Amino acid sequence: MSESNEGAEPGGALEDPVWVLRMVGWIAIGGGVLLALIQANSSGRNSGLWILIFLGVAILGALLRIEAAIRDAKRH
């Protein structure tokens, strides 16, 4: 006989969109800042442009974290 899963909590954190937004935000912030620092320490013709692009990625990550906080606050 099969058991009914009515009322069961959804399994796994990947089903929670707020958790996913938070993690993607952290990855974007960390990756953007890290890549901007690496690019700042390397010599290149378009170094300034790449630094701005990577810092833009970090800012997008911060905006994702803010969005996750807003959704989390609305949920509780």
Image (cartoon, rainbow, N blue to C red):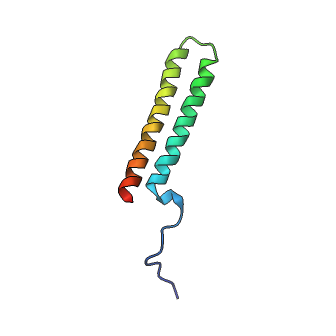
Q: Position of residue 55 (x, y in %)?
A: 50, 27
From the viewer's perspective, is residue 4 above or below residue 50? below
Q: Quadrant of residue 75?
A: bottom left
* Tally of numbered tags: 0
Q: Residue at x 55, y 40 (%)?
A: 27
Q: Position of residue 25 (x, y in %)?
A: 49, 42
Q: Residue at x 54, y 62 (%)?
A: 12
The quadrant of the image that shows the C terminus is: bottom left
Q: Position of residue 74 (x, y in %)?
A: 35, 55
Q: Residue at x 57, y 36 (%)?
A: 30
Q: Residue at x 51, y 57 (%)?
A: 14
From the viewer's perspective, is residue 75 above or below residue 51? below
Q: Quadrant of residue 37?
A: top right
- In the picture as drawn, the residue positioned furthest to the top comes out as 45
Task: Return the residue nearer the eye: 45 or 71.
Answer: 71
Q: Position of residue 8 (x, y in %)?
A: 47, 75
Task: Return the residue nearer the eye: 54 or 74.
Answer: 74
- In the picture as drawn, the residue positioned furthest to the bottom comes out as 1
From the viewer's perspective, is residue 68 above or below residue 16? above
